[in-house]
Image: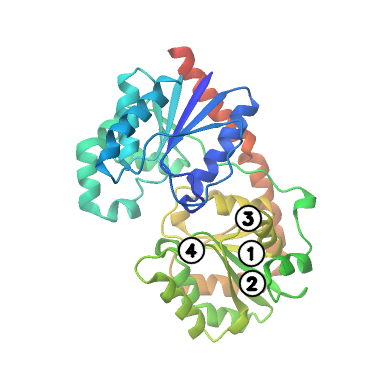
């Protein structure tokens, strides 16, 4: 069986979709599937892809009109060489080309929505989104073999928008770290160069530092939180979004809090450093306005860390299974919830254990890979 994936970027900064694809492609190869990924070149560091997976640059930099013919040829070559194609994303020009061209070749296309129909996303550049839906997006989605969503909430939202194509719910997956992948507190602090003592507690934000992720709302009330909970520190891990002066906004809020070295920015973390920040964390927080499905939440829970998230994270199971807390993405709500949570060590421990159990029951990497394998196998048998 030959399975193709198309994604506009495999760069680390692309976040969850690229990371999820790295996991799924490796798992499918382990099952004996021939996997090829079509993508666009980027002058950025990419996520680690299993060397057994072929990576094909289907186009040059498509912003250059001279490369569009290259894009058409590259995507046709990708689609013609596989039994089924999974397209990650819906708004990009290459996404649209792939769905049209693969359909012309009779190759079934499953489209992964990646949270791109959320209200928050549709409200950004609404005229452009309306035009895209009118010209190609709605047509492409209706002609997909299935629409892959991460959650039941996203499935209901897709149906509410009027799309009638079959919907498959396949969340992201994760592998809980082995014991030797975890670091003792002192060693983790040394790896990151952080002044964290054994008695300190760490509140962790990990993700791209972008306005929609809501870090500014967390920082707005952090002075009150840290003043009332003197054993706690905030560690912020992730790269900054460069637009809208957001980095200046965030750093100004941190300075104005007057909390000094109790708020630490450690930049983008990978591999050993990522394991170190999770090894330090006692509570993970993501105050996001909108998420397709956050890999960072899953990773934190796989370390047995309870999570504080918002409704926009689309993960109601966190509260249903007492794996953490869900609160509004507002400064006052975040501040009040943290002041309730942080003093309660026993509740943090209990919810951390529940978080790990939820991962083991529902969100293991093997579950996700099997879902893609079954979907691809059905498509091949129908052809």
Q: Is residue 175 above or below residue 269?
A: above
Q: Work out whether residue 165 can be spotted.
A: no
Residue at 62 percent across and 22 percent down: it is 32
Return the residue at label 2: 342
Label 2 close to label 1 by CB (< 8 Å):
yes
Q: Nearer the viewer, residue 269 or 207?
A: 269
**Residue 190 screen position, x and y as percent:** 74, 69
Q: Which residue is mark 3?
A: 300
Disc marking residue 112: none
Q: CA distance from mark 4 to mark 3?
A: 14 Å
Q: Quadrant of residue 76?
A: top left
Estimate how packed mark 2 is, as few (under 14), some (14 to 19) or many (20 or more) residues with alpha carbons within 10 Å: many
The reply, left or right, for residue 97 in relation to residue 14 is left
Residue 89 position (above or below residue 303): above
Graded by Cα atoms within 10 Å as few (under 14), some (14 to 19) or many (20 or more), the crowding at tag 1 reads: many
Q: Given contact means CB atoms under 8 Å apart, are the residues at marks 1 and 3 in contact?
A: no
Answer left or right for 211 relative to 21: left
Q: Alpha-carbon distance for marks 1 and 3?
A: 9 Å
Question: Of marks 2 and 4, which one's residue comes earlier in the chain?
Answer: 4
Which comes before the other along the chain, label 4 or label 3?
4
Percent from the top left, x then y, of residue 40?
A: 41, 41
What residue does disc 4 label?
A: 287
Q: Mark 4 and mark 1 in contact? Answer it, CB < 8 Å.
A: no
Q: Which residue is pictured at 68% across the width and 50% down the height?
A: 356
- In this view, the mark in front (2 or 1): 1
* Horizontal side of residue 130 vs 39, given as left or right: left
Which is more N-terminal, label 3 or label 1? 1
Q: Is residue 62 visible?
A: yes
The residue singled out by tag 1 in the image is 283
Q: Nearer the viewer, residue 370 or 43?
A: 43
Q: CA distance from mark 2 to mark 4?
A: 16 Å
């Amino acid at each position: 069986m030959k399975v193709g994936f198309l994604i506009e970027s495999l760069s680390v900064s692309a976040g969850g979709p690229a990371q999820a694809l790295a996991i799924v492609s490796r798992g499918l190869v382990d099952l004996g599937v021939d996997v090829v990924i079509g993508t666009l070149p980027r002058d950025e560091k990419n996520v680690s892809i299993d060397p057994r997976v072929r990576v094909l640059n289907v186009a040059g930099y498509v912003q250059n009109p001279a490369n569009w013919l290259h894009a058409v040829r590259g995507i046709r070559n990708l689609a013609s060489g596989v039994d089924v194609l999974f397209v990650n994303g819906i708004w990009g020009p290459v996404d649209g080309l792939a769905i049209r061209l693969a359909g012309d070749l009779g190759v079934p296309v499953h489209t992964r929505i990646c949270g791109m129909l959320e209200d928050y996303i549709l409200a950004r550049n609404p005229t452009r989104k309306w035009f895209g839906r009118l010209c190609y997006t709605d047509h492409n989605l209706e002609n997909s073999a299935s629409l892959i969503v991460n959650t039941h909430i996203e499935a209901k939202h897709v149906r509410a928008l009027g799309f009638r194509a079959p919907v498959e719910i396949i969340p992201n997956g994760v592998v809980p770290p082995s014991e030797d992948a975890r670091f003792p507190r002192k060693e983790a602090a040394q790896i990151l160069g952080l002044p964290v003592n054994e008695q300190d507690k760490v509140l962790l934000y990990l993700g791209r530092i972008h306005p929609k992720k809501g870090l500014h709302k967390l920082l707005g009330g952090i002075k009150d939180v840290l003043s009332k909970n003197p054993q706690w520190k905030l560690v912020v891990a992730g790269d900054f979004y460069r637009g809208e002066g957001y980095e200046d906004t965030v750093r100004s809020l941190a300075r104005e809090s007057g909390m000094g070295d109790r708020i630490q920015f450690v930049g983008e973390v990978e591999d050993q450093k990522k394991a170190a920040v999770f090894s330090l964390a006692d509570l993970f927080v993501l105050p996001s306005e909108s998420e397709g499905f956050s890999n960072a939440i899953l990773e934190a829970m796989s370390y047995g860390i309870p999570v504080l998230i918002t409704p926009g994270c689309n993960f109601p199971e966190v509260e249903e299974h007492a794996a953490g807390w869900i609160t509004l993405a507002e400064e006052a709500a975040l501040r009040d919830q943290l002041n309730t949570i942080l003093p309660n060590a026993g509740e943090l421990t209990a919810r951390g254990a529940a978080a790990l159990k939820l991962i083991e029951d529902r969100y293991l990497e093997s579950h996700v890979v099997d879902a893609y394998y079954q979907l691809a196998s059905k498509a091949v048998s129908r052809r």
